[in-house]
Image (cartoon, rainbow, N blue to C red):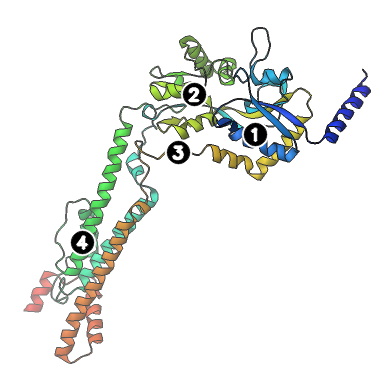
C-alpha cells in the first residue's frame, strides 16, 4: 500500500473512533506500593491517580489489568520482551502505566512519554549502620542556632538585671556614699557564668530582689544543662561504633556490609554498563556475591534484618524510609532518569499523553500525588537527636523573664520603702528623695575605695 493509502486509512480509523465516542484503552500495570495497590476489587495508588487525571484531560476511558507475569519488561535469551513492555509490543495492551524507567533499550521496542517522575539511584541501610562523619563542632550542634542565641540573650539580660538590682536595692547597698558595691557589672557577668556552670561565684545577693533573680537563673541553668546533657547522651549513644557510609564509593570501599539490587533490573544494568570504575566494581561484587533481591520488598526485608544495603531507585527507597522507620537513605543520588508511560511504536497517543503529563506537572497535581502517597508514618525516635530549639523550652524562658521582672520590681519597692521613710523624717517629697537616691547610686560608677571610706569616717 502506498504512503498516501496509509494516511487515508489512518484518517478513516481516527474519524471512526471520534464518531464512536471516547476510546477505551487497554492499560497494563504492575502491583507495587504506592503506584498500584489492591483495595477490594479495585486498584489505588499514584499511577491510578495519574491515569485518572490523564484520562480526564484527553477524554478517554480505560480498562486496567495487572501484568500477567508480574514483570516490568526485559528481553529473554531469544530477544523477546516480557512483562508490561512485552504486552505492549504484542498488542495485548495499548499503554503501560507503571513506574517504568525510561531507557534506551526500551525506546527501541516501544514509544515512551515525557517522564511523570524524576529519580535516580541510591541505597538504603539500617540507621544503626549509617552515621554522619564526626564534625569538629558537633557539641554545638546539640542546640540550634536560635537556641544558642536565646541562651546568650538570657545570660546578658540576667547579668544586667543582677547589676541593676544590686545598685537599686538598699538591702544590697544601703549607704552608697560610704560602702563598696561588690556587684560591679563585670562581677555580675562572672557571677551569672558561675551559676550556669554550677560552680558559684561569691559574694551572693543579700536582698530579696537579688535572691529572686539568682534563684530563677539557677532553675533556668539546671533545666538547660539537663536538656543539653540528655541530647549529648543520645548523640554519643547513636554515634558509638557506627560506620560512615554516605556514597556509593563508601559502599564499594568497605566489606562489612553486603549490598545488592534486583537482578536484571534497570538499576542492575546501570552498574553493569557503567564505565565508572567504582560503579563497575559494585556490579562485579554483586555478581560475585550473588547478593540479588527478587523484588523491592525482599530488598527492604533484607535491609531491615541485618548488614545489607539495598540499591534501587530513589523514589522507591524514599517510600521504604517513610514506611520503615529504622531505615535511612544515603544522600547521594546518581544516574538521574525518569518514569514514563509506554505505548506501541508509532502510537499517536504518546504526544497527547506527554502534553497531559506536562500540564499536570505545571499545575502541581503530580506534586500533590507524590505528597499523598509518600506521606511518612515515622515519628523521630531512637535516632540521633535533632538540635533543640527555643520553642521546646519556651516555658523556662518565660519563667526567667517573669523572674527578672519580679526582681527589678522588688528592688524598686525596697528603694521606694526606704525613700518614703527618709521623706517622712526629713519632711521632703518621696519622689525627690527616690530620685536623689537613684542618682547617687548610678552617678560616678564605682563605689568609694576603702581608703576614701576611712578618710570620710575620720
Q: Which mark is nearer the camera, 1 or 3? A: 3
Sequence order check, earlier mark of 1 and 4:
1
Regarding residue 229, the answer to whether it shows in the image is yes
Sequence order check, earlier mark of 1 and 3:
1
Quadrant assignment, res 160: bottom left
Secondary structure beneath dot 4 equals helix
Secondary structure beneath dot 2 equals helix
In the displayed structure, would residue 457 be above or below residue 208? Answer: below
**Residue 331: x and y, percent?**
48, 32
Q: CA distance from mark 4 to mark 3?
A: 44 Å
Mark 1 and mark 3 in contact? Answer it, CB < 8 Å.
Answer: no
- Name the residue: 65% across, 15% down: 82
Sequence order check, earlier mark of 3 and 2:
2
446 relative to 278 in the view: left or right: left
Secondary structure beneath dot 3 equals loop
Specify the farthest residue to the front.
41
Secondary structure beneath dot 1 equals loop
The residue beneath circle 1 is: 116
Q: Which mark is nearer the camera, 1 or 4? A: 1
Q: CA distance from mark 1 to mark 4?
A: 62 Å
The residue beneath circle 4 is: 214
Sequence order check, earlier mark of 4 and 3:
4
In the displayed structure, would residue 204 be above or below residue 119? Answer: below
Amino acid at each position: 500500500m502506498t504512503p498516501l493509502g496509509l494516511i487515508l486509512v489512518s484518517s478513516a480509523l481516527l474519524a471512526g473512533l471520534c464518531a464512536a465516542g471516547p476510546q477505551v484503552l487497554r492499560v497494563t500495570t504492575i502491583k507495587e506500593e504506592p503506584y498500584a495497590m489492591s483495595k477490594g476489587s479495585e486498584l489505588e495508588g499514584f499511577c491510578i491517580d495519574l491515569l485518572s487525571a490523564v484520562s480526564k484531560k484527553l477524554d478517554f476511558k480505560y480498562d486496567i489489568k495487572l501484568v500477567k507475569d508480574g514483570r516490568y519488561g526485559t528481553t529473554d535469551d531469544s530477544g523477546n520482551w516480557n512483562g508490561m513492555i512485552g504486552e505492549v509490543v504484542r498488542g495485548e495492551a495499548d499503554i503501560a502505566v507503571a513506574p517504568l524507567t525510561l531507557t534506551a533499550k526500551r525506546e527501541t521496542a516501544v514509544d515512551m512519554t515525557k517522564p511523570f517522575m524524576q529519580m535516580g539511584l541510591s541505597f538504603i541501610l539500617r540507621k544503626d549502620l549509617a552515621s554522619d562523619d564526626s564534625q569538629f563542632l558537633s557539641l554545638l550542634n546539640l542546640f540550634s542556632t536560635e537556641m544558642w542565641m536565646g541562651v546568650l540573650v538570657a545570660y546578658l539580660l540576667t547579668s544586667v538585671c543582677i547589676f541593676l538590682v544590686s545598685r537599686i536595692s538598699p538591702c544590697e547597698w544601703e549607704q552608697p556614699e560610704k560602702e563598696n558595691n561588690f556587684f560591679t557589672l563585670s562581677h555580675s557577668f562572672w557571677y551569672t557564668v558561675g551559676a550556669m556552670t554550677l560552680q558559684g561565684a561569691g559574694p551572693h545577693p543579700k536582698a530579696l530582689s537579688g535572691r529572686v533573680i539568682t534563684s530563677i537563673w539557677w532553675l533556668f541553668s539546671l533545666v538547660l544543662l539537663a536538656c543539653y546533657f540528655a541530647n549529648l547522651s543520645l548523640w554519643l549513644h547513636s554515634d558509638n561504633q557506627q560506620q560512615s557510609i554516605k556514597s556509593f564509593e563508601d559502599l564499594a570501599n568497605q566489606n562489612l556490609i553486603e549490598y545488592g539490587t534486583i537482578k536484571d533490573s534497570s538499576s542492575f544494568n546501570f552498574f553493569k554498563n557503567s564505565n565508572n570504575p567504582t560503579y563497575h566494581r559494585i556490579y562485579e561484587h554483586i555478581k560475585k556475591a550473588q547478593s540479588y533481591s527478587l523484588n523491592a520488598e525482599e530488598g527492604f526485608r533484607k535491609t531491615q534484618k541485618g548488614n545489607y544495603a539495598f540499591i534501587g531507585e530513589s523514589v522507591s527507597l524514599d517510600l521504604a524510609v517513610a514506611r520503615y522507620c529504622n531505615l535511612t537513605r544515603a544522600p547521594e543520588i546518581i544516574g538521574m532518569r525518569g518514569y514514563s508511560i509506554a505505548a506501541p511504536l508509532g502510537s499517536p497517543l504518546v504526544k497527547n499523553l506527554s502534553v497531559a503529563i506536562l500540564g499536570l506537572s505545571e499545575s502541581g497535581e503530580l506534586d500533590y500525588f507524590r505528597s499523598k502517597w509518600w506521606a511518612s508514618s515515622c515519628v523521630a525516635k531512637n535516632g540521633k537527636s535533632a538540635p533543640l530549639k527555643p520553642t521546646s523550652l519556651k516555658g523556662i524562658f518565660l519563667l526567667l523573664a517573669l523572674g527578672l521582672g519580679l526582681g527589678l520590681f522588688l528592688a524598686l519597692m525596697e528603694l521606694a520603702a526606704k525613700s518614703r521613710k527618709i521623706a517622712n523624717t526629713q519632711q521632703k517629697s518621696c519622689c525627690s528623695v527616690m530620685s536623689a537616691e537613684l542618682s547617687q547610686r548610678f552617678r560616678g560608677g564605682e563605689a568609694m575605695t576603702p581608703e576614701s571610706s576611712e578618710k570620710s569616717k575620720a
